[in-house]
Image: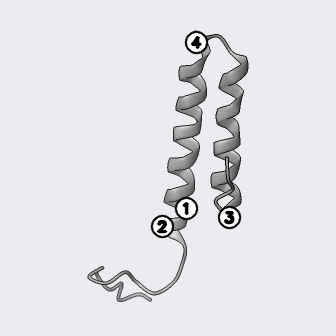
Amino acid sequence: MAPTGHAGVDAQLRRLADADHLAVSGHLGVYEDVHRGLRDTLTALDRRSGPPAPGAPHDPGS
């Protein structure tokens, strides 16, 4: 698989290869783990500080 350029995403995608060494009954656990990791990575990216997204409410405390 070609790298995405984001270490967190690339690590999760490499984790998918773990399913190759498991019986089919073990695939779901790997897929759920990867899904959770990708979701956490995307959530962390959304939380990065920076200018607010267009249309986002302004935080008067900032």
Q: Residue at x 69, y 56 (%)?
A: 3
Callout 1 secondary element: helix
C-beta proximity under 8 Å, tags 1 and 3: no
What label does residue 44 carry, if any?
A: 1
**Which of the two discs, 1 and 3, labels the residue nearer the N terminus?**
3
Q: CA distance from mark 3 to mark 4?
A: 30 Å
Callout 4, which amino acid?
Answer: Val
The secondary structure type at the circle numbered 2 is helix
Residue 25 pos. (x, y %): 57, 10
Q: Nearer the viewer, mark 1 or mark 3?
A: 3
Position of 13 relative to 53 (above/below): above
Q: Position of residue 39 (x, y in %)?
A: 50, 49
For residue 57, above or below residue 11: below
Residue type, numbered disc 1? Ala
| Disc 2 target residue | 46
Q: Are marks 4 and 2 in contact (CB under 8 Å)?
A: no
Left or right: residue 56 versus residue 8 is: left
> Considering only vertical position in the picture, is 29 above or below 52?
above
Identify which residue is drawn at 68% across, 15% down: 22
Report crowding for label 3: few under 14, some 14 to 19, many 20 or more residues within 10 A (C-alpha): few
Q: Amino acid at mark 3?
A: Gly
> Label 4 vs label 2: CA separation?
34 Å
Instruction: Measure the alpha-carbon separation of dots 1 and 2.
Output: 5 Å
61 on left or right of 12: left
Q: Nearer the viewer, residue 6 or 58?
A: 6
Quarter of the figure that contains the C terminus: bottom left
Q: CA distance from mark 4 to mark 1?
A: 31 Å
For label 4, the residue is 24
CB under 8 Å between callouts 1 and 2?
yes
Q: Which amino acid lies under the numbered mark 2 shown in the image of this protein?
A: Asp
Residue 5 circle label: 3
